[in-house]
Image (cartoon, rainbow, N blue to C red):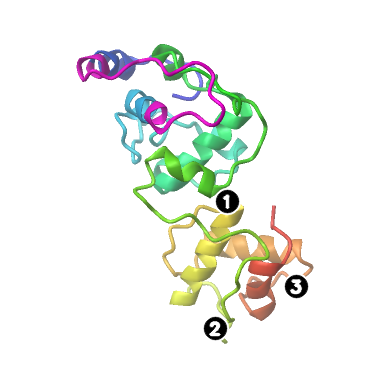
């Protein structure tokens, strides 16, 4: 769990991990991010591995983020409502900022830090895909400069639903928005559109037209 609080669940889960024959330590310092098995143990201790966990006392998701910590690494909305791949990404982001320190379970499990702990290197979604909780979801589209699909020829606005909107939403995940790709233009999509328009000197109308569409692939990142 992020921050300090009593860990009744940890006291129950740790013996279970031992009974299953899982080692509670990881190898000494590694040369890259922690192994997927280390993340699996952390999730099991924090939330019994459930990404939709809402404890009711301000801690959410598989990694038991509180909201200030989630937002400090760019998380949007509530952690338990984000996709597993998004939660994995934010957990790796936090690890690279602060190491294992935010998780009490990491100390209980004696997880070892490695060269990326506190490195301050912002990860990519591709780098967090190995963590195992994303269910094999594909990584988000590449950053600016990657292949750009043709503008669909329709100006989208709040309330619209269409397949090209899903393409736009998934593209914006490259900038950390955490869309699941509903294809419906609601508040979160409007925020992403406005952020993109303001970053690229486009009139901040909230309308997803050709200039804003192009900027998602070839313009300046919105953050």
- Where is mark 1, residue-wise? 176
Numbered range of the magenta stretch: 16-39
User: What secondary structure is found at the residue carrying circle 2?
Assistant: loop
**Which residue appears at 50% of the width and 72% of the height?**
165
- Where is mark 3, residue-wise? 203
Q: Residue furthest left?
A: 19
- 86 vs 117, nearest the viewer: 117
Q: CA distance from mark 3 to mark 2?
A: 20 Å
- Residue 58 in magenta stretch: no
* In this rendering, the label closer to the viewer, 3 or 2: 2
Q: CA distance from mark 3 to mark 1?
A: 22 Å
Q: CA distance from mark 2 to mark 1?
A: 24 Å
Observer able to see residue 60: yes
The answer to whether residue 218 is left or right of residue 113 is: right
- Residue 38 in magenta stretch: yes
Q: Dot 2: within a 10 Å radius of its alpha carbon, few (fewer than 14), some, or many (20 or more) residues?
A: few
User: What secondary structure is found at the residue carrying circle 3?
Assistant: loop
- Where is mark 2, residue-wise? 152
- 96 vs 8, nearest the viewer: 96
Residue 213 in which image quadrant: bottom right
Instruction: From the top left corner, tell me how far across and down residue 206 is, in percent.
Output: 64, 70
Label located before the other in sequence (3 or 1): 1
Instruction: From the top left corner, tell me how far across and down residue 82 is, in percent.
Output: 43, 47
Q: Dot 1: within a 10 Å radius of its alpha carbon, few (fewer than 14), some, or many (20 or more) residues?
A: many
- 15 vs 178, nearest the viewer: 15
Instruction: From the top left corner, tell me how far across and down residue 200 is, in percent.
Output: 76, 66
């Amino acid at each position: 769990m992020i921050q300090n609080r009593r860990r009744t669940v940890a006291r129950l889960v740790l013996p279970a991990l031992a009974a299953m024959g899982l080692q509670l330590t990881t190898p000494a310092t590694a040369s890259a991010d922690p192994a997927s098995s280390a993340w699996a143990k952390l999730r099991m201790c924090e939330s019994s591995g459930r990404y939709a966990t809402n404890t009711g006392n301000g801690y959410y998701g598989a990694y038991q983020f509180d909201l200030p910590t989630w937002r400090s690494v760019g998380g949007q909305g509530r952690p338990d409502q984000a996709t597993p791949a998004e939660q994995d990404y934010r957990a790796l982001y936090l690890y690279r900022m602060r190491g294992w320190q935010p998780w009490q379970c990491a100390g209980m499990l004696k997880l070892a830090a490695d060269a990326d702990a506190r490195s301050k290197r912002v990860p990519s979604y591709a780098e967090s895909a190995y963590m195992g909780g994303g269910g094999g979801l594909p990584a988000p589209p590449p950053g600016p400069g990657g292949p750009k699909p043709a503008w669909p020829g329709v100006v989208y606005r709040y309330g619209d639903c269409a397949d090209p909107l899903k393409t736009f939403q998934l593209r914006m995940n490259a900038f950390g928005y955490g869309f699941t790709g509903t294809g419906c233009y609601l508040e979160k999509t409007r925020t992403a559109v406005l952020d993109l328009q303001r970053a690229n000197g486009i009139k901040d109308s909230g309308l997803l037209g050709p200039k804003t569409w192009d900027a998602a692939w070839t313009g300046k990142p919105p953050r």
